[in-house]
Structures are given as structure tokens and as C-alpha cells.
Amino acid sequence: MGTAGVVPQHARPVTFWQSTNGKKVVMAVTGAMMFAFVIGHMLGNLQIFEGPGTMGNPARIDVYGHFLHSLGELLWIFRGTMLLAIVLHITATVQLALRSMAARPVGYSRQQAINSSYASRTMYWSGPIILAFIIFHLLQFTAGVLHPHATFVEGHVYANLVSGFQVWWVSAWYIFAMCLLGLHLSHGIWSMFQSVGLAHPRHTPLLRNAARAIAILIVLGYISIPISVLLGFVK
């Protein structure tokens, strides 16, 4: 009798994380979490345009910051959850990319580069750069332990942002990271459309343009703050 179809006794079942579909699910869930956070964080930061406030009427963004800090341990649990989501997202993305490269014939490499978008091809190396930026950003504006050539006063969100972004290379680093985030979002939002079944050859151009438009609006919202500080509009 032949041995075809016999599963070796030592073979172990593939876990959810080890499977390709499992990694794609992790990417989708963590991507949706981060997209929601990006929108909420941007709306919170844009309150800086409400002005610096007065002695008896603190800046709107300072009030927002005090509210977040009043959450106590819940805020740190949320931050830890989001950092874990980012790490899982990047890990799953890189591992899927390595699997794809290992399974793809060399002869198709040029065709793949032609058919894929620039945003999708930058997903693998821009993710770790964005993670490094997030760590720097937290150390500067949240923990206050890293604020080169700037001042940091606990609870004074408006003043800390203005002081931090007045340093040109900090603003440049922030703008660069947000542009990479925009590339990520452009591809990620398009992938989200596909995941929920909206992708169709007839609708593809519209959905791709919608993904790009959403990503561009988010990037403009974020970088408007350091640009406004550098130009003296926010001071």
C-alpha cells in the first residue's frame, strides 16, 4: 500500500498565528484599530488651532490632555494595547512579505513590481520607521524625557507642542513620518475596502482614489500643526 496522503505522526497542526490567513486577520484587525486611533488622535491634536487660552480659560488642547490623564491606568492600558497592535501589525506584514517572496518565482519579480503600487511596496520598510517615530514622539510629548532644544512642562500640551515643533528637524522628522503614514494608509484603506467585499473591477478606480483622498486629508491634518508652528501661525 502506498503512503500517499498519510500525515506524519510528528507533524504539528498549524496555529492561527502561523497560518497565512491568521496573519492576514491580525493585519486587518490591528490595521482597523490603528486607523481609528489615527483619526481620533488627529482630531484631538487639531484643537491646538483653538488657541493658547488664557489664565482663567486654559487652551482647549490642554483640557483635552487633562481629560486623557484623568483616565489613569486605563490610558496606559490603551497605550500598551495600541503599541502591541502596531508590533503585531508590522510583524505580520513582514512575515507575509517574506513568505510571498519565498513562494514567488524569480521570473515574476518584474511583473509584480509593475502591477503593485508604490505604497504597497513601501509597506515593509516604512512600518519600522513609523514605529521608531512613535516611540520618539511618545518620549518627547508624552513622557517628556526627550525634548531636544525645547522645553517641556507637564500638563501644558499647547506650549509643549509649540516648543517642540519650533525645532526645525523635529518638525521635519514628524512631517516625513506622517508622509510615510499616508502611504501606509493609502494601501491599507484600499485593502480594507477589499476585505469588506467592496472591491469590484468597476469600482476599483473610485475606491483607490477614495483611499488616496482619505490618506491625504489625514496627512494634511497632522502636518498642518508643525508647519503652522514653523511659519509662526501658531505661537
Image: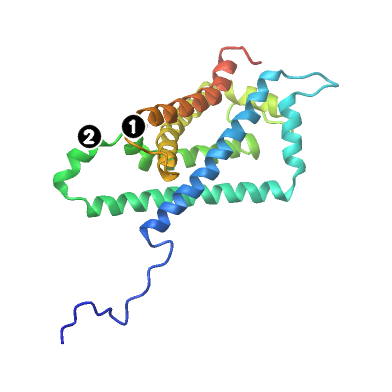
Above or below — where is 166 with respect to 69?
Answer: above
Image quadrant holding the N terminus, namely: bottom left
Q: Which numbered disc flags the more N-terminal residue, 1 or 2?
A: 2
Q: Could you tell me which residue is drawn at 38 percent across and 68 percent down?
A: 14
In percent of width and height, residue 106 lies at 16, 48
**For residue 206, which quarter of the picture?**
top left
The answer to whether residue 144 is visible is: no
In percent of width and height, residue 194 lies at 40, 42
Q: Nearer the viewer, residue 140 or 91?
A: 91
In percent of width and height, residue 220 lies at 51, 22
Q: Nearer the viewer, residue 143 or 78?
A: 78
In percent of width and height, residue 117 lies at 31, 33
Image quadrant holding the C terminus, namely: top right
Residue 44 in the figure: left or right of residue 118: right
The secondary element bearing badge 1 is classed as loop
Q: Mark 2, residues whose alpha carbon is within 10 Å: few (<14), some, or many (≥20)?
A: few
Q: How many marks?
A: 2
Instruction: Give the colouring mode of the picture.
Output: rainbow
Which residue was labeled with disc 2?
114
- Mark 1 residue type: Arg
Which residue was labeled with disc 1?
202
- Mark 2 residue type: Ile
Dot in front, 1 or 2: 1
Q: Mark 1, residues whose alpha carbon is within 10 Å: few (<14), some, or many (≥20)?
A: few
Name, please, the residue furthest toward the bottom.
1
The answer to whether residue 41 is visible is: yes
Q: Could you tell me which residue is drawn at 60 percent across and 50 percent down?
A: 80
Q: Nearer the viewer, residue 35 or 127?
A: 35
